[in-house]
Amino acid sequence: MKPVIWELEERISEAMREYAQIPGACPAIVRPATDPKFGDYQVNGIMGLAKKIKADPVATAQAVANSLDLNEFCTSWNVAGPGFINLELKAEFVARRMLEINEDVSGLAVEKAKIPRTVVVDFSSPNIAKQMHVGHLRSTIIGDATCRILEFLGHKVIRQNHIGDWGTPMGMLLVIVEELQSKFIQNIENLEKFNPESPLPAPIPLEEIEQLYKDANKRFEVDSQFAAKAKKYTYNLQRGIVNTWWHIRNISLSSCQKIYDTLDVKLNIEHVRGESFYKNLLVDVVDDLKKAGIAIESDGAICVFPDGFKNKDGQSLPLIIEKSDGAFLYATTDLAALRYRVDELGADAIVYVTDARQKLHFEMLFAVARMAGWASEDVELSHVMFGSVLGAGGAPLKTREGENVKLKELLDEAVERANAVVEEKNPGLPAEKKAEIAKAVGIGAVKYADFSNNRTSDYIFSFDKMLAMEGNTAPYMQYAYARIKSIERKAQSRDVDIETELTGLKALSLSDPAELDLAKYLIRYGEAIQAAAADYRPNYLTSYLYELAQKFSAFYTNCPVLDAGPDKRPTRLLLCDLTARVIGHGLSELLGIGVVEQM
RNA sequence: GCGCCCGUAGCUCAGUAGGAUAGAGCAUCGGUUUCCUAAACCGGAGGUCGCAGGUUCGAGUCCUGCCGGGCGUACCA
């Protein structure tokens, strides 16, 4: 079902085009009304049109309004202010939409994409020389939510976990492991049959590997001999298989998988296409760019100098694709991956969910891909960037020791804190239920807090805030859902059969302002999803869900459901049911946040 | 130096191709529970949208210049 706003937009744009008789678009720019007293929607585009045709905006608006027939949707479409048209929806139309949503159990009457696209989403992408930490949170969950939203709209989504398993950090690690061979060699041999998907414990804990990596990193800074060797090993790794490397990789991937499962992020081993996957394509990337005259040698490195990028001295800035020692870099693997995604995966769009600091890298990468003709202009290349997670002081979130906070520890603490709240608010529940609630609330709180911020800005991480029951938080949303479920449970004990009251339902009685307000908002779910998808911004979805929950609360306070008379009760039951379905769908299907029947 | 992101209420944040009187939550002040979960709801107070210009019928949003913060800027990712 097409969002109302699109429907109105099309009709009014058409009326404007006919009235103005000019070539080109006449966008009506229909938006939700900025104030309820202006109705439900407002037309903003007439004043722009009036300017274009040098006419009086109010007269133009009046003429357009006179030519409109919106009887199907609206009770009124009146000119107001300097040239707006205010639209008010008909209760019958709203009711019809509600019933359509009710019919569509899985799709909630949300319009699917007319032309489904193949969208490759590159997200999470941890460097596997260390455990996942808070720095991987945003890419992982924003990427996952993006995939879920696009899938729901009918697009073909290909998830790609571009793990860092092939660069200098790995080279460093290999040197260290080699030096410590005596200690690790037996363990490594035991690893021969290690399978990241199996529940076998990793014979070398990732924590130990990570400690090795940290040591290596420090030595890399101060010990030039060590650094040279690490670079040599990176080179070797990239030219052949190294046994140790494979084992380390498996251990790390199995650790990542646990995090993905905890976060309810749909990623598994099949989505892993790390840097190493492209190892056989890297030489061609460089050769082809050289042959095309796009890449040239500069200071011993092979570089591409796309137009419009300058370094600090005002000279052209290179995208280096092969170092002077012959090793490849992330630009090389990214280019190989991009080419693979277009040629082999058939991508119409490639979406990179990485932090804002990599903006320049992706701008250059995209420029080079276009220069080389590897991505034509009709392949969308998007860098979906995001800000940092900050601690209370406004500095990047770190432990007291100044280290990155491990994702596992962060999530464990969230569940623990949620558990304490459940224990306080609802101690009588069975232990199993309490644990389930704590998990949904704790993990949900972390994810929801992230989604509800505009992704481009940094945000301050606060357990207290994200676990609060007031405001735009996961627990608030989950509570609204649980309250509705409670009504449904109570219905049974009062011999109200929701099934029968709702199945035969043909007409609604939306008379109370709170009912109508909630209903009008319910039919806008599709609008919110489209907006979130268009800009890859989950916060449009959380804003919608929050406002929906607030409107539900107003309805809940003003309109008794189970005690309502037979003329009102079916409508109210439907309002409850659809609200729960929309919240449940938004949270669990699109954002991967659990809902609970009781809390 | 140059480039990018940002600066909105005491605090944390929204603000969807420029639209009507800039919105939430916390904190603060006041009210609501014989009634479907008060983990809730309702109301008050709180703003020169960093500063100064400009474009426009109209600017938090676009342009220019400053101020303040963050990030990036040739062989890390």
Image (spheres, helix red, strand yellow):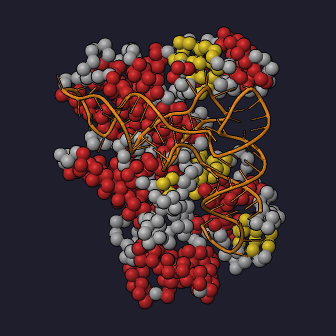
Residue A595 appears in the figure: yes
Q: Residue at x 36, y 56 (%)?
A: A414
Residue A140, visible in the rendered structure: no
Residue A79's quadrant in the figure?
A: top right
User: Which residue is rendered at x = 59% and y = 40% of the image?
Assistant: A534
Residue A362 in the figure: left or right of residue A190: right
State whether residue A70 is above or below residue A583. Answer: above
User: Is A483 placed above or below A299 here?
Assistant: above
- From the image, which quarter does the C terminus of chain A lie in? top left
User: What percent of the width, then of the height, locates residue A159?
Assistant: 53, 53
For the residue pair A424 and A131, the one nearer the viewer reads as A424
Relative to A518, say whether A142 is above or below.
below
**Along the line of sight, which residue is nearer the eye, A117 or A364?**
A364
In the displayed structure, does residue A252 sit left or right of residue B51? left
Placement of A483 over or under A459, stated as above or below: above
Which residue occupies the foreground of this view, A28 or A113?
Answer: A28
At horizontal 31% and vertical 52% (from top left) the residue drawn is: A418
Residue A276: percent from left, percent from top: 57, 68
Residue A110 percent coordinates (x, y): 50, 31
Identify the residue shown where x is 70% and y is 15%. A58
Q: Quadrant of residue B26?
A: top left
On the image, which quarter does residue A502 sit in? top left
